[in-house]
Image: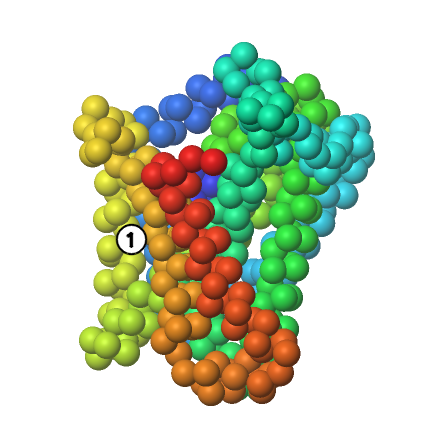
Amino acid sequence: MVAGWTLAYVFRAASGVFTRVTAEGSSAIFNDLVSDPERLLAWHTVFMVMTIVVVSRGVKSGLEKAVRYLMPALFVLLLVMVGYAMNAGAFEQAQTFLFQPDWAELFFRKDDAGAFLLADDGSRILRWDGVLSAMGQAFFSLSLGMGAIMIYGSYLSHTASIGRTAVVIASLDTLVAILAGLAIFPIVFAFGLEPQGGPGLIFMTLPVAFGQMPGGAFFGTLFFTLLVFAAWTSAISLVEPFVTWLVENKGMNRVMAAAWAGLAAWLLGCVSLLSLNVWSEYTLFGKPFIDLMDYATANLMLPLGGFLIAVFAAWLMRRESSMEELGSGDSLRYRLWRVLVRYLAPVAIALVFLQVSGLIEF
């Protein structure tokens, strides 16, 4: 559904809707979109069709071709945006915002008045919620605990190194995240806008910046096209595990499995988009459906999935099998991995799970 918003904004940016738009005007454009269920349904449907067409074509003709071309295209577009942002006038301010840590905010808890809390012995109290939030973000960014990485991994050659591939994926994910920050925040600061997070930054703040800059229609279209590519490749990877399960366990052919998976995702998206307008007064567990889905997937299902995967890999999978898959033999590196995955990873994931679910607080 959110990818549908992004598709809509590609055409809005290209048509010059954001030219000289004010903050109030940008908010009105976004609110007008999300309050119209018919337009939301149309864009949501278009995006789901794009995703299912690729997935239904299989690994070689669909997934491999899509990822082979879309991911490099996304990276090139991102570099173009970073190149523009370097000349936007606030690149240094953005670097400070991104890379200069405020250690007090990270390590010490403050009371409601903004003063540091002190322990009984007068020392400052260590703050862990920032660290746990970062771990939760890592889960989401790396698609851990949702099956996508496992499915893609199962399509790799047996000669591919799992350890080396994991390091490359984590490194590239971090690089792209940094480049995205360097592409977005210089533009935000150059036009005196607030670097708020979430949908507000993408769909309300950035259009104001694009509307004020020279060539804003071009760069706005480029930026939202980049987001569509990112959402498209992510959606493909998220649908693929369900499709694979239907093919291997229910005997469906791939096209039928992709259609059923796409229908399920489309229906959930329909309920989500209706919860923004027609059904906005209805809640479940005190939350609108879209907020409940966001909370359940990011805060509960991902950490729980990661915890179970770690337990399976370290406690249920045979030692010989894991050594063979990792290709390391009974080396010091393997034994260190086994200790980390057996003991440290489950405890760390459990803490993330308990903290983000609100069952404990640090």
Question: In the image, is residue 214 above or below residue 133?
Answer: above
Depth check: give the residue in front, 246 or 13: 246
What's the residue at 27%, 31% (across, down)? 287
Q: Is residue 298 above or below residue 274?
A: below
Residue 124 pos. (x, y %)? 62, 27
Crowd rating for badge 1 (residues with CA inside 10 Å; few <14, some 14–19, many 20+):
some
Residue 286 appears in the picture as rendered: yes
Is any atom of residue 2 visible in this view? Answer: no
- 102 relative to 152, above or below: above
Q: Going 80% across and 32% down the picture, which residue do you hit?
A: 92
**Residue 16, horizontal then vertical, whole percent:** 57, 29
Q: Quadrant of residue 245?
A: bottom left
The image quadrant of residue 91 is: top right
Give the side of residue 34 with respect to residue 150, left or right. left
Which residue, given by chain and number where applicable, does mark 1 sit on?
265
Residue that appears at 47% across and 41% down: 6
User: Total marks drawn?
Assistant: 1
Q: Residue at x 38, y 29 (%)?
A: 33
- 233 w.r.t. 95: above or below: below
Label 1 sits on a secondary structure element that is: helix
Give the image location of residue 149, x and y in percent.
47, 66
Q: Say which amino acid is labelled 1.
A: Ala
Coordinates of residue 278 in the picture (x, y in percent): 22, 28
The answer to which of 4 and 362 lies nearer the viewer is: 362
Q: Is residue 4 left or right of residue 85?
A: left
Locate residue 156 relative to residue 253 in the image: left or right.
right
